[in-house]
Image (spheres, rainbow, N blue to C red):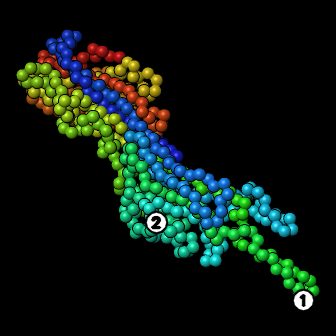
Amino acid sequence: MNLKNFKHYTVLGLVALLLVSMIAGTWAYWTQAIQAVNEFKVGKYSTNLVETFVPPTNWQPGQDVNKDVKVTNNGTVPVFASITISQEWVRRENVYDADGKIVLPAAGDTFGNTFAGTSGQEYAALLHWGKDVVLLAAGKTSAASLSLGLPTVNAASDAKGKWLLASETPNADGNFVFYFMGVMAPNTETPLLLDSVEMNPHIQATTLYETTVWNKTTKKWVTTRVENPTYDYQNARFTLGVTMHTVQATADAMKEMFASNTASTQAVISYLETISITGQSVDNSRDNNVGEKKVYLHNRTGVLQFTPATPGENWFMSHLNMMPGETYTDTLLVENMTDIRCKLYLQAIPRNGYTDGLPKDLLERIHMNVYYADALIYDGTALGKEYNGSGKNLQNVVTLGDYAAWKTGKIRVELTLDKNTPISYADLYTMIDWKFIIQGDDLPSDTPTSPSNP
């Protein structure tokens, strides 16, 4: 399941590069290493339904009651939002006629949201919407008395930044589902969906009058009671349900969350898919992948060095807001800028203090593929361990190849957060270290033993 919210809630982050250059004497000839600190931070998923409503104690026909409804995004994850509006009428206590008989429905029974008015079926509760709420023209009802009074748009794209209802005909559950037609960025809110609710002024008391006439055929007096068709709403309780659904603003998450069982709804879903985002486009990276990052052996000093994407920063990978199911890609250029032939190795080292308990579990929920020169050299978790039988394990030393003088190569890392990451992982932080080890000329042909295997 994606991180999501049914009044509700639906991320991650990566990676630092702290450079530590050092000469090690445990390998043949000479060896240098730089250490990359990989940090993982689960993004904060926090959306809220904001509702201002004071239920009236004695609601009367024609009485308008304030009910403000909107959604806020207080997290760090862009989201899509929808709101489902439901209505329910329930008889609170029995109502009796002049003969002492119960006028149905009885106490505790529910009854319909509409009644037979003078111009056809009408809603007993009239909903008054915010100014940024619209209806797809194709979904407009033919019954004027059941119109919700919403302005129409011809296409979902015309509702950008507004709440959109696909159809004035309630769904199979008798509810209306409104979609916010935009990506809710962190620390933003939607326009008002609902502003107030009014009891239909056409609702009247149970009995209007009685007439008594002499029936010549039966030779009896006959009394007829004339009842208003809105008798159900006398002594009744009205509940207006508002349910928020939010989900991270990606196409896969949105399609899993929002059902598209009608042509009108499918038009809404299709538009949201076009404005959905990918992990890289919303990633709060420290360097934001501004420039080329590289590890290189300096041609004058002979010292292994690192050039970050942004001057003054030391990060290689730093995705601080990863989202479940999304993939993030980083590249690192590797250069031998000397006349000395070298070999390059890579090792992942779990960091003490960050790999116990849940943070370690978090690392295992991040799938990582590492490519060198487009060849897959690692396929496993961000913890550095492989679990699928390939034997490729970054907690051991992995070779990145031989580097002839002035040779260039490239490392590509693809990270995917498990789409079933639960909300309990939100805002957690953990680390691992990556060590790049370069060994100089006159090297033995065997791959060296790791100097610091965990």
Residue furthest out toward the bottom: 216
Q: Residue at x 29, y 36 (%)?
A: 285
Foreground residue among 69 and 134: 69
Q: CA distance from mark 1 to mark 2?
A: 57 Å
Does the rendering let one see residue 405? yes
First in sequence, mark 1 or 2: give its number: 2
Q: Quadrant of residue 186?
A: top left
Would you place residue 169 above or below residue 454 in this image?
A: below
Q: Which mark is residue 135?
A: 2
Q: Quadrant of the C terminus?
A: top left
Q: Is residue 445 left or right of residue 387?
A: left
Q: Residue at x 44, y 21 (%)?
A: 356
Q: Position of residue 175 (x, y in %)?
A: 57, 59
Does the rendering let one see residue 444? no
User: At label 2, which amino acid type do we have?
Assistant: Leu
Residue furthest out toward the right: 219
Q: Quadrant of residue 34?
A: top left
Q: Position of residue 422 (x, y in %)?
A: 48, 37
Q: Is residue 12 left or right of residue 99?
A: left
Q: Quadrant of residue 125?
A: bottom right
User: At label 1, which amino acid type do we have?
Assistant: Lys
Q: Position of residue 37 (x, y in %)?
A: 29, 25
User: Which residue has dot 1 on it?
Assistant: 216
